[in-house]
Structure formats: C-alpha cells, structure tokens
Amino acid sequence: MLAHSSSDEGALERTDSRTEALLAALAGGLVVSCQASAGSPMRDTPTIARLAVSALQGGAVALRVNGVDDIAAVRALTEVPIIGLDKRMGPRRNVITRTDEQVVALIGAGADIVAVDATDEVAGDVEARVRAAVVTAGPRPIMADVSTLDEGLRSWEAGAAFVGTTLSGYTPYSRADPTPDVELVAQLASRGVRVLAEGRFQTPADVGRAFDAGAFAVVVGGAITDPVAITRRFASAAPRAR
C-alpha cells in the first residue's frame, strides 16, 4: 500500500486495490457532475439518470451525483465510478456531506467516492472532519471539497484521497472570481496533492488549462448538464439581450 507521502511518518494509508482501480479510471479524464437544484425543470431522478448516461456516451470517465436517490438510479445503469455527495442548503450556501451518517447513506446508495465539505467555514476542524469521514467510509476514498490551499493541504494530510477545488469562491475568505481557480489547482498539484479541479469550468480550454496545471482529473457540471445556464450564456450574446 502507498502512504500519504514519503515524508509523513505514520500517515494514514490512502490507497488499496479498490482505490487503485478508481485512480486508473479517473486519471486524466473528465468527470461530469449530474445535478439539478430544487425548482429546476431537470430536478427529477430519471432525468438525472439520463443525463448521466448521456455524459458517459460523450466521454465522461466518472460522474458526480448528489443524493441517495439519484446515486442509486445512476448506479443501476452503469458501473463507472460515482462521486457521491449530499448537498444541502446551509445558512449561507450549499453544504456538502456534513455528517458521517450521510457518508454511510451515500455509500449504501452506490457511491464509490464520497465528497465532503472540508472548509474552515463549515467543518471548523478540517483535519478532524476528513479523518472521521475516512474512517467512516472504510475502503472507499474521500474527496475533500476545499476553497483554499491551506484547507487542501490539511485535508490531504488528514487522509483525503482526492482534493477538489470545488468551493473556491464559495467561502467568504477564498478567491472571488467568476473563472476557474486554476492557480489553486497548480498550487496543490505542485505539493503532491491529487487534485480534482472543479468549479466554474465552462469551456474545453478551461479543462485543458487545469490539466496543464497538474489536475489529476477535471469535474465539469453546469456547463454540460444545466440547459438553463447554457441557454442563458448563449442568449446573452443575442441582440435582444444587449
């Protein structure tokens, strides 16, 4: 088995045969996030499942899916890796898999990897949150969704198999910019962290930049699976919108 890093004595082990298979499946590939918020015309479990299959036909190597019902429906249709999360509205923003009970439920629904909120804003003690999730998930890897370099490094040291840049720009102390935080991807990757670049990726060029910065894989959501947002982008270029 491989430890966290050669310099971390007593570090938690992060890979086993299950994780190695997931790494091989995700490495250098596109992960598509198939989600829809309450009130969206797409907010229907069979619709999410069809989105997932469409993404796979288009070349996605894995899927990111929210909630036990949607995960179970997608799992029934495919054996590709699923990153599961339980996203619920908090006081200021959506919070991702806050409790270990949610981790257990997501695994039971068929998630291969579980994403958790590993921000100071929500977790408080980032290291403790990640360690608890790692123990609860057992052989299934944890993806720590972070907003800053410091949160990412602490999550990695605490045992996360993947660190996602998902929440950059969503905490009050992180980078506020409408573009993907490729700099954060590069900072984490340069320190040996296995990065899943996620957050505001809109174009193939964005994806390419993330891989150039050292991303292990890239997650794209709304730019592929949200027809309302996609239409809004195109409509904004029409004369009637000016």
Image (spheres, rainbow, N blue to C red):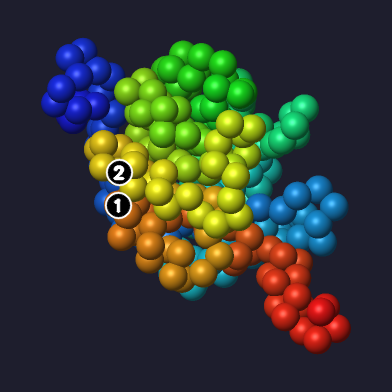
- In the image, residue 171 lies at what x, y percent? 62, 34
Question: Could you tell me which secondary element the residue under label 2 belongs to?
Answer: helix
Q: Seen in the image, is 237 located left or right of residue 86?
A: right
Does residue 152 sit above or below 219 in this rendering?
above
Amino acid type of the residue tagged 2 in the rendering:
Ala
Q: Residue furthest left?
A: 6
Q: Classify 67 as above or below 104.
A: below
Which quarter of the figure is the N terminus placed in?
top left
Identity of the residue drawn at 38% across and 38% down: 162
* Local secondary structure at mark 1: loop
The reply to whether residue 133 is visible in this rendering is yes
| Residue carrying label 2 | 189
Residue contact at pointers 1 and 2, CB within 8 angstroms: yes
Is residue 43 positioned above or below 117 on the image? below
User: Circle 1 sits on which residue?
Assistant: 214
- Name which of mark 1 and mark 2 comes first in the sequence: 2
Classify mark 2: residues with Cα within 10 Å, few (<14), some (14-19) or many (20+).
some
The answer to whether residue 105 is visible is no
Q: Cα distance, mark 1 to mark 2?
A: 5 Å
